[in-house]
């Protein structure tokens, strides 16, 4: 009896082995197909990103050229010679014959601080009246030789 069971099992075994090998073959084909499809998709995405990168670089170059043109236009419109010609021609302004300077105290100095500095007998670093400053400035050796 054992012999007949073994013979019967042996008859069924090749069929099960064939089914197992066929299912393994199908599974390997599916796996390989998925890998190939994934590889192709990744290459397509890389190519698409490459084209986008090239387009963005071209757009960047165009924007840099436009920026340079706008900076040139700003410099041209804000040049002092242009402003002076507009002031003379359109507004009727002219250059002053004599330029006068007015010395002003800084905004953070109060009158109390000025009084304290003038009452101190020792020379300290402080503020000078404009007339005194300009008279000492005019007495410099540089201006006396001329």
Image (spheres, rainbow, N blue to C red):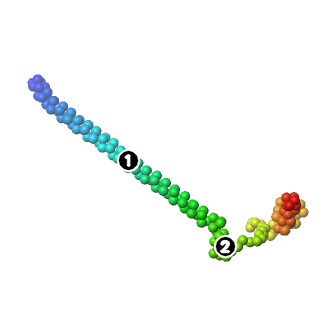
Q: Is 49 situated above or below 93? A: above
Residue 145's x, y, as percent?
Answer: 87, 59
Could you say which is closer to the camera, residue 35 or residue 2?
35
Q: Quick one: which residue is furthest to the right in this view?
A: 121
Task: Evaluate whether residue 110 shows in this view.
Answer: no
Q: Residue at x 51, y 59 (%)?
A: 66
Label 1 residue SS: helix
Q: In which quarter of the image is residue 117?
A: bottom right
Relative to 90, 23 lies left or right: left
1 or 2: mark nearer the eye: 2
Label 2 residue SS: helix
Q: Quadrant of residue 113?
A: bottom right
| Badge 1 or badge 2: first in the primary sequence | 1
Could you say which is closer to the camera, residue 45 or residue 92?
92
For disc 2, the marked residue is: 88
Answer few, some or many: residues within 10 Å of disc 1's Cα (few below 14, many 20 plus, some between 14 and 19): few
Residue 46's x, y, as percent?
Answer: 38, 46
């Amino acid at each position: 009896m054992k012999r007949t069971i073994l013979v019967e099992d042996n008859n069924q075994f090749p069929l099960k082995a064939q089914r197992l090998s066929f299912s393994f073959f199908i599974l390997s084909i599916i796996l390989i197909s998925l890998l190939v499809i994934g590889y192709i998709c990744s290459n397509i995405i890389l190519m698409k990103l490459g084209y986008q990168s090239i387009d963005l670089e071209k757009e960047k170059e165009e924007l840099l050229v436009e920026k340079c043109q706008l900076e040139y236009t700003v410099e041209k419109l804000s040049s002092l010679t242009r402003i002076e010609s507009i002031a003379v021609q359109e507004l009727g302004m002219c250059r002053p014959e004599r330029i006068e300077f007015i010395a002003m105290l800084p905004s953070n100095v109060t009158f109390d601080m000025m009084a304290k500095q003038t009452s101190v007998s020792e020379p300290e670093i402080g503020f000078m009246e404009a007339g005194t400053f300009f008279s000492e400035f005019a007495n410099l050796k540089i201006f006396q030789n001329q």
